[in-house]
């Protein structure tokens, strides 16, 4: 028998379950405020990004070209001399490395002997020129099947490659093909692989592909973006529009529906055409994309501000920069000349003739004057 206390507990449990069931009811939300807030946030992010883009365009289109012209006019001769010294040093350094390799590989005991061997090898003509006709000797005893085609592949090997291609790639048994079709596809195969005969692409027998899920939506978004961003439909030359155009082509090529929807929402917000077709999740994706672009461009500008070309077009007095660079180039020239003299002295010590004992004794200074 249930007590009054047990009945009261069951009644309370049923009442609580009923209240929880009512709490689970779907309540429609008005997305208007959320959408307006998202559009406002997109506008702020776009304004921040546009401010950085103005700075970047000025640096790329004004500062860097002006700095390059000034450097060529002011330090052109010094830069040419530095490049010439660098090229001469690299040439001598390559010779030193070759001598070191000769000692290691041939077991040569001295640098002088290794240097002489390297110079003899450099002075010798290539092997194919020493033979007289400029061609390597051919092997004798070739049979009729080894007669190569102009492309270097025998005819029977071309047939074997073609039949392997039919079986492995196209899934066709060449034994079941008619002679006419076999010859036609073989000629196309030779034209494409070996450059022989005609150049029409071979016919492909592929089963019809079933339409992928969302393919219609991808094409619909792509057509809309093409109408908005195609270079032929826009009079202005905007690098941002060009970047969006390339992103659209890449997303469409990979069949990335989510990326295409985000790009469509971005163009909607840019043109103040965001409506009910632009979902709240797409707007938030645009905000994330704008913030990511902002931080990436901010890092690039941070690196650009450390370059000498930053704000160069707006700097009328360049005397301090000229003195600074002149000192730097003078130091670089001295270091490069010292490095070249060092490697040249090393090579000269290897190529100098060996002195006899009599010559060494004659060059000695007497210890006493009487």
Image: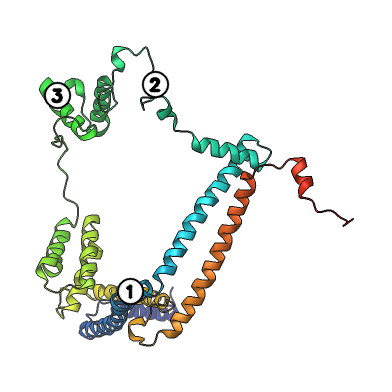
Crowdedness near tag 2: few (<14), some (14–19) or many (≥20) residues, C-alpha within 10 Å: few
Along the viewing direction, whichever of 142 and 112 lies nearer the viewer: 112
For residue 137, which numbered disc appears in the image? 2
Q: Tell me the mark number nearer the camera, choosing from 2 and 3.
A: 2
CB within 8 Å, label 3 to label 1: no
Residue in the picture at 20% in, 84% down? 32
Residue in the picture at 20% in, 71% down? 241
Q: Tell me the mark number nearer the camera, choosing from 3 and 1.
A: 1
Q: Is residue 365 above or below residue 336?
A: above
For residue 69, which numbered disc appears in the image? 1
Tag 3 residue: 183
Numbered disc 1: secondary structure: helix
Along the viewing direction, whichever of 123 and 160 lies nearer the viewer: 123
Residue 369 spot, x, y in % from top left: 87, 57
Numbered disc 2: secondary structure: loop
Residue 157 spot, x, y in % from top left: 28, 22
């Amino acid at each position: 028998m249930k007590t009054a206390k047990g009945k009261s507990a069951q009644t309370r449990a049923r009442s609580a379950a009923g209240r929880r069931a009512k709490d689970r009811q779907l309540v429609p939300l008005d997305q208007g405020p959320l959408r307006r807030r998202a559009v406002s946030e997109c506008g702020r992010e776009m304004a921040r990004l546009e401010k950085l883009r103005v700075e970047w365009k000025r640096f790329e289109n004004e500062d860097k070209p002006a700095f390059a012209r000034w450097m060529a006019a002011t330090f052109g001769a010094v830069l040419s001399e530095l490049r010439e010294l660098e090229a001469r040093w690299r040439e001598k350094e390559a010779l030193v490395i070759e001598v070191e390799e000769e000692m290691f590989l041939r077991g040569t005991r001295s640098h002088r002997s290794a240097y002489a061997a390297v110079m003899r090898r450099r002075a010798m003509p290539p092997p194919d020129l020493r033979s007289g006709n400029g061609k390597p000797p051919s092997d004798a005893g070739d049979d009729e099947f080894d007669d190569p085609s102009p492309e270097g592949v025998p005819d029977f090997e071309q047939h074997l490659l073609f039949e392997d291609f039919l079986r492995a790639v196209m899934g066709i048994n060449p034994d079941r093909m008619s002679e006419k079709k076999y010859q036609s596809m073989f000629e196309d195969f030779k034209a494409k692989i070996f450059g022989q005969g005609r150049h029409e692409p071979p016919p492909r027998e592929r089963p019809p592909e079933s339409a992928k899920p969302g393919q219609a939506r991808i094409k619909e978004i792509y057509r809309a973006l093409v109408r908005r961003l195609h270079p032929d439909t826009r009079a202005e030359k905007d690098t941002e529009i060009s970047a969006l155009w390339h992103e659209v082509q890449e997303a469409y090529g990979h069949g990335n529906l989510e990326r295409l929807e985000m790009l469509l929402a971005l163009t909607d917000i840019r043109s103040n055409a965001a409506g009910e077709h632009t979902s709240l999740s797409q707007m938030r994706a645009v905000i994330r994309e704008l913030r990511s672009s902002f931080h990436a461009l901010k890092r690039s500008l941070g690196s650009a501000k450390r370059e000498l070309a930053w704000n160069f077009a707006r700097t009328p007095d360049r005397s301090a920069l000229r003195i600074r660079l002149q000192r730097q180039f003078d130091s670089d020239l001295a270091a490069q000349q010292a490095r070249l003299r060092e490697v040249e002295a090393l090579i000269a010590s290897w190529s100098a003739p060996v002195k006899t004992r009599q010559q060494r004794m004659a060059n000695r200074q007497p210890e006493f004057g009487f």
